[in-house]
Image (cartoon, rainbow, N blue to C red):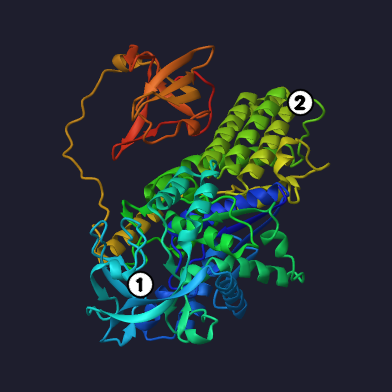
Amino acid sequence: MSKVLVTSALPYANGPIHLGHIAGAYLPADLYTRYQRLQGRQVIHIGGTDEHGVAITIRADLEGKHPREIVDYYYGEIKRAFDALRIDFDNFSRTSLPLHHKQAQAFFLRLYEKGHVYRKDTEQLYCPKCRRFLPDRYVVGTCPYCGYEQARGDQCEKCGRWLEPVQLVNPRCALCGSTPELRSTFHYFFKLSAFNEPLRRWLESKEHWKPNVRRLALEWIREGLRDRAITRDLEWGVPVPLPEAEGKVLYVWFDAPIGYISSTIEWAQKQGRPDLWKEYWLDPDTKLVHFIGKDNIVFHALIWPAMLMAHGDYILPTDIPANEFLNLMGDKFSTSRNYAVWVHDLTRRFPVDMIRFGIARILPEKKDADFDPRTFQTMVNTELVNNYGNFVNRTLSFVERYLGGKAPRVGSDPDPEVRRTLEEAHREVTEYLETYEFRKALMRILALSDVANAYFDRGEPWRTRKTDPAAAQRTLAHCLWYVKALSILMAPFTPESSEQIWRHLGLDRPGWKDGLDPTLPEGLQIQGVRPPFRKIQDRETEELILEIRSRAQQAGISAPQEPEKTEEKPMETVKFEEFKRLDIRVGTIRAAEPVPGADRLLKLQVDLGEGDLRTLVAGIKTAYAPEELVGRQIVVLANLEPRKIRGIVSQGMLLAAVEDGTPVLLRPDRPVKEGTPVS
């Protein structure tokens, strides 16, 4: 791989950034970029704000301001939100800059001169009351495909169809609400239809793409692409660079993706090497990855590649790993209705690493996901704090407290089991990150942390430091190796805590593979240890829920409610002798797979210690993916009568809480030996 060019969708500079935006494109792009940097590859993350288009001018009209005031304000707000979440860009530009206008106009002229753009007389909706032609988003009406009554003139939010304003049923002006009329005008059209077959062949070759992206793009191809207007009648935007086109600007979805190129050019200029951008955009070996949400698939997988094909000089996207939508407590995020959790809502409450972890844990990679503050609290407290954070803190604190901070060394005879465990986890996490499966990568890291905690417990350094100091030192040396490896694997997800851990370990910008090496600096002294994370308190969660409910009510959304409380019946008691008959033990899941043909069932192989490996069938498939269970400790009722389920004999029952119909596995707050009884 020569170079990696990462882009994330340019957000409209007409409002702040919420968690739905972060989960859709920006956190995944940052995770991937940080991983590539740790690999030592030449990678740049390019972004910026989209400062043209009707969304900007509508906001300006409604607030009685010039569009420049709107974009200047929100550029700063958006940039601060990204900075607060440690989402780093090598260059974060603006499409209102003269540099971008120049590049967009040159791109248009190139296509025009090559015959890919033509002028066409057309009819467009005109508002007599506002005395103006109405570009796409200035028109709302009923979608002709799904009947949604609030569809915009460019796209239906409900069914995702790409629209033209004249297609809407019962159209009305978005500003004044009056019924517009058709009037003659002209626009410039891009010959998108000419690229139907080239795009089909190109898309069919992308067998490694996410199925949702490739499938949707090919559906459009099968329906047949139509030529699209790429100009609008607006005062704000990139002027069409033709004498006869006065008063017309480039359509935002033509000029916006060119912002990826102009932002890279700006980056190169800031490096003092103005031609450096060409080593990315003109080099066919460059890996170009566009991180977007699924609402941008049609533009990035069809229109933009067709534009690049028509131009002829630039590389085509290598990957477009679009995410699905993140919802908020069962309903859609809505910027216009202020139903959202804005980035500043969380950054003023919680440390950045906890937020990044919580979002990464529920990324909507294959299907829509939901953000619920209670789930966020549970995952942070149990998985980040009690698992990974607990292991790091107990290891470093033990060395500081009982060894005077002097880090023990693994020496020339490292434990082969530890090496094998780390190499296996490293390989799997690498594979997941290379294919944009960030949730799987994170769960595999947490499973490794479970193993590390168990290693600490088996070594019992609190005992052997008195009875066998050499054994205690060896245990802690290998635990420090685990800490080193885990902190590097977690660095894309939790950069601030990883940097804190590296300072304790005397590491200066370690590389991705350095975690496989147990070596630490000679004479390392570990001092000033503090827990890398804190727990989220119930009070903080409830305050956030109340805020969300308030916004829901103001937006006219059915506010998320507490589960209905049923009348409690007197608790039935059991005798202690009956309870003693239950053999409840802690086990570790060694393997997990779906039960064929079953929507809710997983087949688990659970290690209960001393060679007792049980098969369990559990109805937890809707809550847990098989790969995130391996290595996890659970609580098992071991002496339950065996039962055949879907042809599989289940030899026990795992214990779980059930919240709103969703199973939540019970687990010890720190790893214990397999087979440990629960009493």
Tell me, yes or no, if residue 202 can be seen here: yes
For label 1, the residue is 137
- Residue flagged by tag 1: what amino acid is it? Arg
Per the image, label 1 sits on a secondary structure element best described as helix
Tell me, yes or no, if residue 679 can be seen here: no
- Residue 408 horizontal/vertical position (percent): 77, 35
- Reply above or below: 625 against 123: above
- Nearest to the observer: residue 214 or residue 546: 214
621 lies left or right of 143:
right
- Residue flagged by tag 2: what amino acid is it? Ala
- Residue 633 horizontal/vertical position (percent): 49, 28
Query: Of the residues under marks 2 and 1, which one precedes in the sequence?
Result: 1
Q: In the rendered view of the protein, which quadrant contains the C terminus? A: top left
Using the image, tell me which numbered label, if any, was put on residue 470.
Answer: 2
Neighbor class of circle 1 (other Cα within 10 Å; few <14, some 14-19, many 20+) is many
- Residue 84 horizontal/vertical position (percent): 55, 63
Residue at 73% x, 47% y is 510
Cα distance in 3D space between marks 2 and 1: 72 Å
Neighbor class of circle 2 (other Cα within 10 Å; few <14, some 14-19, many 20+) is some
